Amino acid sequence: MLQEIIDSIFQPGVNKSVVIFTFSVFSLLVFVLLLLMIVTNLNIHVMIMFILTTCVFASLVWFLLELEHAKSISQDQQKNDDKKDN
């Protein structure tokens, strides 16, 4: 998996292993911040970091879903254009 992540630097687009790695890192960060919030008795600074991390993670998921949606629309249009040419 690490080799695929390194190889994806030289490829255009988003590789599946990079997405899995990013989701894993953000999930662990959210988990650690949640534990830290519990340990520090809801410290305001940790709560703000938790909220910011959750928002960034959610926006990343949204962006990747939109990217896949745009890719599928582009492929459908290309198929329709190929059918019209024949």
Image (spheres, helix red, strand yellow):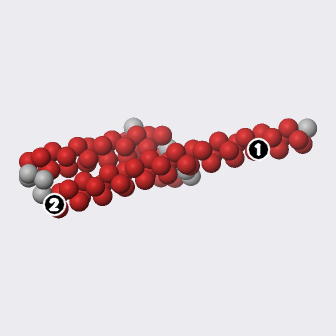
- Residue at 44 percent of width and 40 percent of height: 17
> What amino acid is found at the position of numbered circle 1 in the picture?
Gln
x then y, percent, for residue 46: 17, 57
Residue at image mark 1: 78
x then y, percent, for residue 56: 37, 55
Q: Residues within 10 Å of mark 2 (few under 14, many from 20)?
A: few
Q: For the image shown, how many numbered marks are present on the structure?
A: 2
- Residue at 40 percent of width and 49 percent of height: 58
Q: Residues within 10 Å of mark 1 (few under 14, many from 20)?
A: few
Q: In this view, does 38 lie to the left or right of 19?
A: left
Quadrant in the picture for residue 23: top left
Cα–Cα span, label 2 and label 1: 51 Å
Residue at image mark 2: 44
- Residue at 62 percent of width and 48 percent of height: 70
Q: Is residue 51 left or right of residue 5?
A: left
Front one among 29 and 49: 49
x then y, percent, for residue 32: 19, 46
Front one among 32 and 15: 32
Q: Is residue 75 visible?
A: yes
